[in-house]
């Protein structure tokens, strides 16, 4: 199953990445220590690393299991972040990163709600879920605002190298059909 190449919300267009997006992605979030703090990867040192990320993203679209969208703000054309959907059997998981300058404007919640809406339009999808570091309060808030429920703690589940070399406890949030 493939999601559409473009998903439109009130303020955003979620679209497939292009290699020409690399400078905006690098400047917007990939280079920022604040943004990458709770992520599985370190801040990018240069735009070449961001180009490699986008190349992997485009290839993943072609392979058909992971679909990373860039979130373009309709009004300005600026990027508000990225949202990755991962197809599994009967369920979808996701992950996201917001552009530092656009935090707190409700963009990620808007994108996640749209992804959930699309997911439950698919008759064979029963569950949409994501995990987040137990200390990542804004991320928890996004999932709560999107109607997801906290189901529990996954102990030592994911390594966030910007905080610690040891795997970290994460909350798992989900919404079901
Ligand atoms: C998580 C993230 C994507 C949210 O993006 P966003 O576009 O700012 O999200 P929204 O504006 O839709 O919602 C953010 C919510 O977090 C709240 N928030 C921000 N900082 C907070 C804090 N320190 N404690 C509690 N809530 C906080 C905001 O107030 C807002 O909630 P509100 O609408 O009730 O006021 C963004 O913070 C980000 O990019 N973080 C770094 C990357 C990351 O951690 N990704 C998630 C990995 S699981």
Image (cartoon, rainbow, N blue to C red):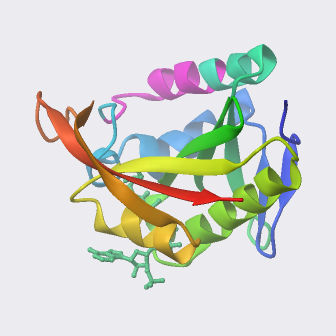
In which quarter of the view is residue 8 placed?
bottom right
Q: Residue at x 78, y 38 (%)?
A: 16
Q: Is any atom of residue 79 visible in this view?
A: no
Image coords of residue 164 (percent x, y): 11, 35
Q: Which one is nearer the viewer's eye here, 155 or 145?
A: 155
Image coords of residue 13 (percent x, y): 80, 59
Q: Quadrant of ligand 1?
A: bottom left
**SS assignment for the magenta stretch, majority:** helix
* As drawn, 52 above or below 77: above
Q: Which one is nearer the viewer's eye here, 18 or 141?
A: 141
Q: What range of the chain is rendered magenta?
A: 43-55
Q: Is residue 176 left or right of residue 150?
A: right
* As drawn, 61 above or below 59: below
Quarter of the image with the N terminus in it: top right
In which quarter of the view is residue 53 placed?
top right
Quarter of the image with the C terminus in it: bottom right
Q: Which one is nearer the viewer's eye here, 104 or 136?
A: 136
Q: Is residue 133 left or right of residue 46?
A: left
């Amino acid at each position: 199953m493939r999601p559409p190449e473009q998903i439109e919300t009130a303020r955003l267009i979620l679209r497939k990445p292009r290699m020409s997006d690399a400078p905006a992605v690098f400047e917007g979030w990939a280079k920022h220590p604040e943004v990458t703090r709770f992520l599985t990867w370190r801040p990018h040192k240069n735009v070449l690393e961001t180009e490699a990320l986008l190349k992997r993203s485009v290839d993943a679209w072609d392979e058909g299991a992971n679909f990373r969208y860039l979130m373009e703000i309709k009004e300005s054309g600026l990027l508000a972040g990225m949202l990755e959907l991962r197809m599994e059997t009967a369920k979808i998981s996701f992950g996201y990163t917001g552009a530092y300058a656009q935090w707190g404007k409700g963009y990620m919640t808007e994108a996640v709600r749209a992804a959930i809406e699309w997911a439950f339009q698919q008759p064979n999808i029963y569950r949409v879920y994501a995990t987040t570091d137990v200390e990542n309060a804004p991320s928890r808030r996004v999932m709560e605002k999107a109607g997801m429920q906290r189901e529990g703690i996954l102990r030592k589940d994911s390594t966030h190298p910007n905080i610690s070399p040891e795997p970290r406890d994460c909350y798992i949030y989900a919404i079901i059909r």
